[in-house]
Image: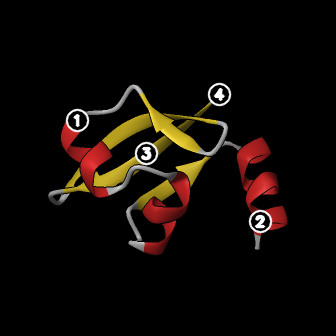
């Protein structure tokens, strides 16, 4: 699992990413950005752990 921070409703918030899915985040965020990929495509993702960033490179 890795920590990731997001912009949601113009506020910084956080989540945990496990196996490419957001977990332990506010229910409203899960409805809008249920996956890491959707958070990236909607430009909601601010930062991720280094290991996760390496994994993202493999997805692209």
Q: Quadrant of residue 2?
A: top right
Q: Residue 27, which numbered label?
A: 1
Alpha carbon distance from label 2 to label 1 = 26 Å
Locate residue 44, reporting x and y percent: 38, 62
Q: Is residue 13 left or right of residue 1?
A: left
* Residue 42 versus residue 5 in the image, above or below: below
Query: Residue at image x 65%, y 27%?
Result: 1
Dot 1: what SS? helix
* Label 4 element class: loop
Spatial distance from mark 4 to mark 3, Cα to Cα?
13 Å
Residue underneath mark 3: 5
Q: How many marks?
A: 4
Which residue position is annotated with label 4? 1
Lower sequence index among marks 2 and 4: 4
Circle nearer the viewer, 1 or 4? 1
Q: Secondary structure at mark 2?
A: helix
- How far apart are the two marked residues, 3 and 2, measured between alpha carbons? 20 Å
Dots 3, 2 in contact, CB < 8 A: no
């Amino acid at each position: 699992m890795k920590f990731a921070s997001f912009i949601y409703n113009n506020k910084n918030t956080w989540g945990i990413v496990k196996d490419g899915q957001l977990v332990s985040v506010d229910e409203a965020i899960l409805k809008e950005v249920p996956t890491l990929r959707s958070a990236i495509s909607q430009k909601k993702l601010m930062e991720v752990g280094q290991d996760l960033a390496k994994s993202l490179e493999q997805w692209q």
